[in-house]
Image: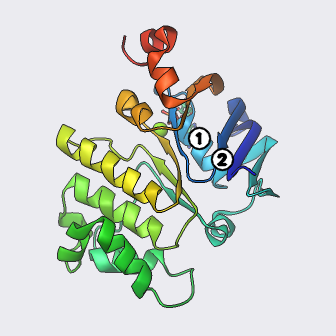
């Protein structure tokens, strides 16, 4: 059974469909990457799946259950965590407070979950008393991912986790995403650093004007000359 299956999605804003028949498939414990030009609808696809943009037609299934149009808090309750492209930390709160807020909807002791986050991101433990707003872009992205992990998700959705980061931090972020995946967490992410992302992807999707153009294993997409020429900068 697929972890996540989005079928034939039509969704958008104010009656205008941005997504037009989009489909996505994530097996449990896979890393799946969505690439494509700016404005293709990648963020819209993530938001539609997570219940933040109305779905006009099509279905989203999670572990076999139809979750189409469920509100985000229900998604979280099912074990789906989503890190948006922007404004994904509370700048005035400390790192620890950000992480604790991430866990608010999941009852029980959060010590084990905090330990897991700190084992993946030791820097966050060192800096747990600092306001998130004074941290670097790379560290803030770690806070955002750490907060998402505090619900103990089976599926982590990341919208451009490496945007604006230096090459060194991009490499590190992809390594941390692989660490997270090795804990048994499926990852669905949108990435502009398409070559690097596809290199670690079990599957990749090329989205353009809200439609699936290509989907294949990460390495196969990287090796596809049409995909390289049109979507990966040659
Ligand atoms: N809140 C919104 N209201 C109206 N149009 C939007 C909104 N968000 C995005 N769009 C439009 O939807 C299209 C797809 O945007 P988006 O999903 O953010 O693309 P991507 O993430 O692939 O760059 C763009 O044309 C964008 O202008
Ligand atoms: Mg986007």
Q: Nearer the viewer, residue 39 or 102?
A: 102
Q: Is residue 178 left or right of residue 64?
A: left
Q: Which mark is residue 1?
A: none
- Distance from disc 1 to disc 2, alpha carbons, whole Å, reads 6 Å
Q: Could you tell me residue 107's position as x and y percent?
A: 57, 87
- Seen in the picture, residue 123 relative to 11 is either above or below; the reply is below
Q: What is the x, y in percent for residue 117?
A: 36, 71
User: Where is residue 60 shown, x and y percent of the image?
Assistant: 75, 49
Q: Residue at x 69, y 40 (%)?
A: 14
According to the picture, the residue beneath numbered tag 2 turns out to be 48
The label number, if any, that marks residue 44 in the structure image:
1
Asked whether, in this view, residue 183 is left or right of residue 93, the answer is: right
Looking at the rendered structure, the secondary structure element under dot 1 is helix
Query: Within the image, what quadrant is residue 223 found in?
Result: top left
Disc 2 packing (10 Å; few <14; some 14–19; many ≥20): many
Q: Name which residue lies at 52% across and 73% down.
A: 151
Determine whether the beta carbon of the residue marked 1 sits less than 8 angstroms from the nearest atom of ligand 1.
yes
């Amino acid at each position: 059974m697929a972890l996540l299956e989005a079928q034939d999605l039509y969704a958008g804003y104010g009656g205008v469909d941005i997504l037009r028949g989009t489909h996505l498939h994530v097996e449990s414990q896979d890393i799946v990457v969505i690439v494509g030009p700016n404005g293709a609808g990648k963020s819209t696809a993530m938001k539609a799946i997570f219940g933040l943009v109305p779905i006009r037609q099509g279905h989203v299934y999670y572990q076999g259950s139809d979750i189409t149009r469920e509100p985000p808090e229900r998604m979280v309750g099912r074990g789906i965590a989503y890190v948006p492209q922007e404004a994904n930390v509370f700048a005035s709160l400390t790192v620890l407070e950000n992480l604790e807020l991430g866990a608010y909807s999941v009852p029980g002791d959060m010590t084990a979950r905090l330990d897991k986050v700190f084992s993946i991101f030791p820097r966050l433990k060192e800096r747990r008393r600092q306001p998130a707003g004074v941290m670097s872009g790379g560290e803030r992205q770690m806070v955002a991912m750490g907060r998402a992990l505090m619900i103990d998700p089976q599926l982590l959705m990341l919208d451009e986790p490496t945007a604006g980061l230096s090459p060194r931090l991009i490499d590190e972020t992809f390594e941390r995403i692989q660490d997270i995946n090795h804990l048994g967490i499926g990852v669905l992410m949108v990435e502009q650093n398409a070559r690097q992302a596809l290199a670690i992807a079990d599957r990749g999707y090329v989205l353009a004007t809200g439609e699936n153009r290509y989907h294949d294993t990460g390495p196969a997409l990287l090796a596809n000359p049409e995909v390289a020429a049109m979507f990966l900068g040659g």
